[in-house]
Structure formats: structure tokens, C-alpha cells
Image (cartoon, grey):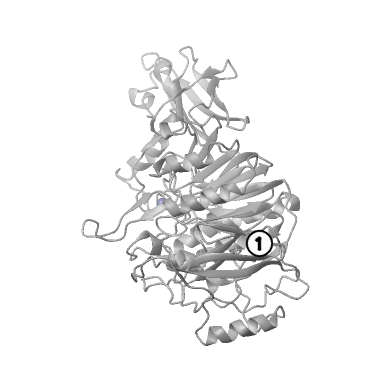
Amino acid sequence: MSVTKPTPHSYAGVIRLGQTRFSAALSLAAFLATTMGLSVPTLAATGTHGGNTHPSETIKATGVVFEDRDGDGLRDQEEPGLSGVRVSNGETIVTTDDQGRYEIEIDAKDATVFVIKPRDFMTPTDADGLPRFTYSHKPEGSPPTQYAGIAPTGPLPASVDFPLVRRPEPNRFRVVMFGDTQPRDLKEVDFIAHDVVAPLAAAEAQADPEDRAAFGVTLGDVVNDDLDVMPPLNAVVGRLGLPWYNVLGNHDMNYDSPDDSLSDETFERIYGAPYYAFNYGPVHFVVLDDVIWSGIGPDRPRGRYKGGLGERQLTFLRHDLAGVPKETLVVFLMHIPVWEMEDREAFYRLIEDRPHTLSFSAHTHIQEYRLLGPEEGWTSPHPHLHVNHVTVCGSWWTGKTDENGIPHTTMRDGVPNGYSIVHFDGPNYVIDFKPARRPASHQMTIFAPDFVTVADAARTEVLANIFTGLKTTPVQVRIDGGDWIDLTRSSEPDPYYVRLKQAETGPNPPDGRPLPNPAASPHLWKGTLPADLSVGAHTIEVRFVDHFNRTFTDRRIIRVVPNPADADAQTDEQGQNGR
Ligand SMILES: [Zn+2]
């Protein structure tokens, strides 16, 4: 792209007057009007003008969505307008006419206009792969905040245009899913580079070209409060060479904003609209902003946030879904889990009649695959899987460091940090959990003591932490190739994680920042060893069938030693090793 961008956030939108060969006369008139301060095409006063953060004056934005055949971001004479493309102001949605033109009412002082990418077309991306689909209209710029928001955009251009490049998209494709990357500083950006991005880039490079990921997503908490870390992180994630969509998290906000509406100004400058939608292949994706910021107040000196969408976003969602065929798979991408959204019931009412829906969140730093049910307020007969997704930063880069200085950062539920690859095929999908630093086959941990006495075996627990387990996941154990026996789901902390945490208060605490306290793991199963184990080494095998009907097996070896009374060499102390 050779175009100089007016402002970083508005890359997609503006045909700058005088640069286009299209409708030059019209542009000249508009240009004069603009420079003379007469730019506002219509000014409909629809309420009081209180000068607050929610001005009520609206103006009409118009523009063209066009096929950018030479990919220069500008509309050339032979480049046609694209009809039937949807453009939104974050609430209403309009559709381009047969000339590719649209018209939409926007707030005169603070508006975001974005194109909903249709199938088989792509918006421009910047050098780091960030899709440019938004035009921000803030004539006076964002209010001053610690981290810069949007610079004054000046009056609305006569034509706010969105270039799209034609590119066929298959029915089958893969998406890279990241939970909270959340680096607090550049050192943690480097952890992300070495622990996840470079190994993933290497794996992608080895994959068949048609099997490579189509794009990636970070599910919020892109950074950890210091919004200046966004650009260097984007540059690192950008080395994957993929279009990369970002979700707003509670650590990505302007905390000095008085309210929710102005809490995403820096995010919007860097990534564009905080909630939006796009199509890829046969799937419709909706990125939600489900963090509501309350600002600082007398009762909340550090501000406060809660999970929710709010009326305006729900209205957008209703309009958006009205334009998506019923049989289409719709994937919702959000930061705070759906069951923590205060208006989740209103959200459900909009999506529950659709046969194919799926959603992802992150935020908790615990992984949980959950089929929504009455407990979450979901009453639809259609299944809905919500994946509260593993994070890239694990437990915020805490714990003992490895030989390369990278913390193990195991999450509180015993799941290693990592990411997922989601395989889409029409309305169907399969999710692969990928642990960082470990083989892809590492889908569980099995906990049992190193050794037990013959007498203790029958009361010795075996626990299996199934990283992608649902409540109903069948998990079984067998010893030395014997019969499979069901394990029982148990809500308790992962014993390996408890050990790691306990080591911090022991005589030789490990290096690295302390881990967060253990949490009850939502995906732990347990049982006891058989009573008749003979002295010697035995193989414990655990298997489970995942949500996508795939069987995974792992194993652990345990030694059974003679009872202390039977053998002088053994002591009680050794026999009690383990938990
Ligand atoms: Zn969060």
C-alpha cells in the first residue's frame, strides 16, 4: 500500500480528496466545503445539545465500498462499487446499493463507521496484519488520557470509502485463537515471541499452504494496562503473517476515562471499532466488547468494570444477525465469559434460535469448555459451546523459569499456557488445544505417587486433569492394559499445581514471580488404584473422548514396593511420597 494514511486508525476508510480519479468534480465541491468549514452535509438536531459525552446531533456519512483491484487503497476509475455489503455505525447497519454506495446516520462528534467484511473479500491490513475496517470520526479527537486516543480527524470527508480486495475463501479453514497475551512490559512481549509466536510460525511454515491458518484472534487483555505495549506486541504477533483480529479486554482500557464510552479510545486508535463483525468463508464472526467500565468515582477510586454488552451493542447484534442466514455458523469472540455478562439473557434471546453458534472468551486464566445449560440461563434446545479459553500468558508469566528464563506460567487449573487452532468446515468445527513448549499430544496430566506400598495401593488416588474436558467428558483408567474403569469428576485443585505453589513457601523457593493461588479445576477426574497390584512397575493409562469424538490417551508409570513390614529396605516415609 502506498497511500499515506490520514490517521493510523482510519486507514481503510478515506479517499482523500484530490487523490482519487473518481468523481473529481463532486470531490472538489466537497473539498471546498470541507476547507471552508461547511462540510456537514446534514445536521439533524434530534435532542438537546448538552455538551456531554453523548452528543445527540447526527450527520449523514456516505461513501462507497469498492473492489480494490490493484490493492492501492484508492478507488480507480475501473474499480467497481460492491453492492450488498453491510456498513455499520455500531448500532444500525445499512447495505450498499448497486453502485456500492451507502449512507448512514452517525453522531456528529464521535462516531465509528465500519464495514462488515463479506465472504471472498478482504479489507486492507497494516504491516502487522491488523485489519483496517474502521473509519473513526472524532472531529475534535479523543479527550486527553494517559495513553493517546484518536487525534482530531477534522470534518467528515465527503466520501468515507472502504476498499476490499477479492480473494476466494474456502469452506474449510483454520483460525489461531489466543487468550490473554497480556504482557506488562517488553520482556513479556519477548516471552510471547519465544514461547508461542516463533514455534507457531515454524509449525505454520511446515503446514501445507492450503492448510495454513486463515487469520488469528486475541481474545482480549491484549496487554496489561500499559497500552504503549500494544504496538511492539502487534509487531511480534505480526510475524505470523496472518490477519489478526483483536478483542477488547479489561486491561486494554483507558482507566482515566470517566465512563465506558470513552474507555476504548486507545484500543480504537490501534485496532479499530471495539465491537464488529466479519465473514470468513461460510462462517460469520462477531467480536463483542463485553467489558463495561464504570470510571473512577467516590466509591471506586480505581474504577471498576463488569461484564456486559449494553443496549447499543445488543441493538447492533440484533441488526447484524438479521442479515445472517439461519443455517450459518456464528462465532462470538469476547473477553469476559458469557456467564459473567450481566445481560447474558438478552444476548441468549438474540442467538438461541440459531442451530449453529459457538463462543470464546478468556479473562479467567482457567480453561473451561462448557455447554451452556439452565445453570447459565440457556434454555434453547440448540447446543452452544462456550470455550473459556487458555491464555498465552498462562498465569501472567509467573512461576519458576526454565533454562531460557521463561516462567512455566502454568494456569491455576493446572493447564499449561498455550493457544488453540480452530478448524472450521461449513457449520462444523473442531478445536485443537496446543500447549506451549510441549508436544501437541500433551492433552492431560496424570497424577499418582511415584511409588506406593502394596497395602496402600487400594487407597491411592489417581487424578487426571483433562485440559479440554467438559462436565460430561468420559474419562477412564486402566492398569497394565487391563479393563478400562470410569474415573469420577471432582472439583478440586490440580495436585501438581498445589505442589508448585507449596514449593514457594518451602526452604528453597524457586525463582520467578509467585504463582496465583490454586483454584478448583473444572476438568479433573479421579479414582483409586486396584487393590491387587503386585510389587514392581505398572503402567497407568488414562483415556478420554473429547467434545469432537476424538480419543486421547496418556500414561504414567508407578512403582509398587513391598509393605514396610515385609521388607527392611522400605520405610514409611518413602511409602507416603506423593500427595
Ligand atoms: Zn481480563
Q: Residue furthest right?
A: 78
Position of 80 with respect to 475 (left or right) is right
Q: Quadrant location of the N terminus?
A: bottom right
Determine which residue is flagged by label 1. Answer: 96
Disc 1 under 8 Å from ligand 1? The reply is no
Foreground residue among 416 and 7 = 7
Relative to 250, does residue 153 appear above or below in the rendering? Answer: below
Res. 240 in view: yes
In the rendered image, residue 464, in percent from the top left (x then y), is placed at: 48, 29
In the rendered image, residue 296, in percent from the top left (x then y), is placed at: 28, 61
Res. 186 in view: no
SS class of the residue under badge 1? loop
Amino acid bearing label 1: Thr
Tell me which residue sits at (51%, 57%) in the image.
192
Q: Residue furthest top?
A: 532
Foreground residue among 284 and 336 = 284
In the rendered image, residue 488, in percent from the top left (x then y), is placed at: 46, 22
Tell me which residue sits at (49%, 59%) in the image.
274
Position of 459 with respect to 203 (left or right) is left
In the rendered image, residue 270, in percent from the top left (x then y), is placed at: 50, 67
Q: How many marks?
A: 1
Relative to 519, does residue 539 appear above or below in the rendering? Answer: above
Count residues near mark 1 (Cα–Cα under 10 Å), then give few for <14, some for 14-19, many for 20+: many
Task: Name the image quarter holding residue 79.
Answer: bottom right
Task: Name the image quarter holding residue 183.
Answer: bottom left
Foreground residue among 328 and 436 = 328
Q: Quadrant location of the C terminus?
A: top left
